[in-house]
Amino acid sequence: MSSSSTMMSTFITSTSTPLYSTKWTPSTTGQYAGTCIFIIILAVIFRSLFSYRATREHRWRDAELKRRQVIVSGKKRDEDGAVLGEKDIGAGGRKVRGSRPWRISTDVPRAFLDTVIAGVGYLLMLAVMTMNVGYFFSVLGGIFLGSLIFGRYALHFAPV
């Protein structure tokens, strides 16, 4: 005998679909509505995190372009001591191309922010994977609302 697992392939309209654990199973319509509101808020937070990251990237880039450069033992370095190659220096001493030097003050917060964004994204994905129509539309509604509120801040800045 072979055992096979069944996977839902259609959306359901139940108001008692568990979210994230069996302990979070709405038993009333009000609890279901509260769960949907939570999902909407989580999706808005997800979009706001993208916008926050874009603004931080812009600030990190501006701070990098403003760093002073010094020459130490024949090599160009910025004020934090990172070695700069000739390709990194443009007219007026501004960096233009190449990879940026690793900095704890920039790369650790960036990695932490990316991890939080991924975690929230996976939580939203799990809500959609319940195949519950209300949860699915709550995610979409929250993404729409978050983009409406924060979308103008999530512009992708072209590298200088």
Image (cartoon, helix red, strand yellow):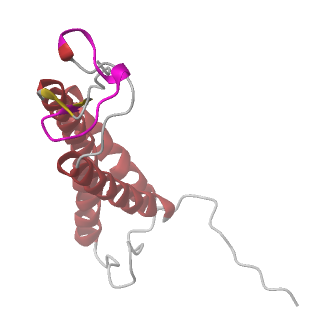
Residue 122 at what x, y percent from top left? Answer: 41, 60
Q: Residue furthest top?
A: 91
Q: Quadrant of residue 120?
A: bottom left
- The residue located at (39%, 27%) in the rendering is 98
71 left or right of 107 in image? left
Residue 13 at what x, y percent from top left? Answer: 46, 62
Q: Quadrant of residue 100?
A: top left
Q: Nearer the viewer, residue 114 or 128?
A: 114
Residue 12 sits above or below residue 106 on the image: below
- The residue located at (27%, 48%) in the rendering is 107
Query: Is 90 colored magenta in this rendering?
Result: yes
Q: Nearer the viewer, residue 72 or 21?
A: 72
Q: Is residue 46 visible?
A: yes
- The residue located at (33%, 57%) in the rendering is 115
Residue 84 sits above or below residue 97 on the image: below
Q: Residue furthest right?
A: 1
Q: Nearer the viewer, residue 59 or 152?
A: 59
Q: Quadrant of residue 39?
A: bottom left
Residue 151 at what x, y percent from top left? Answer: 24, 30
Q: Residue furthest bottom?
A: 1
Q: Is residue 131 visible?
A: no
Instruction: Identify the image quadrant of the C terminus.
Output: top left
Query: Is 150 colored magenta in this rendering?
Result: no
- The residue located at (24%, 8%) in the rendering is 91
Instruction: Identify the image quadrant of the N terminus.
Output: bottom right
| Count of number-bearing discs | 0
Which residues are the magenta region? 77-92
Residue 60 at what x, y percent from top left? Answer: 18, 35
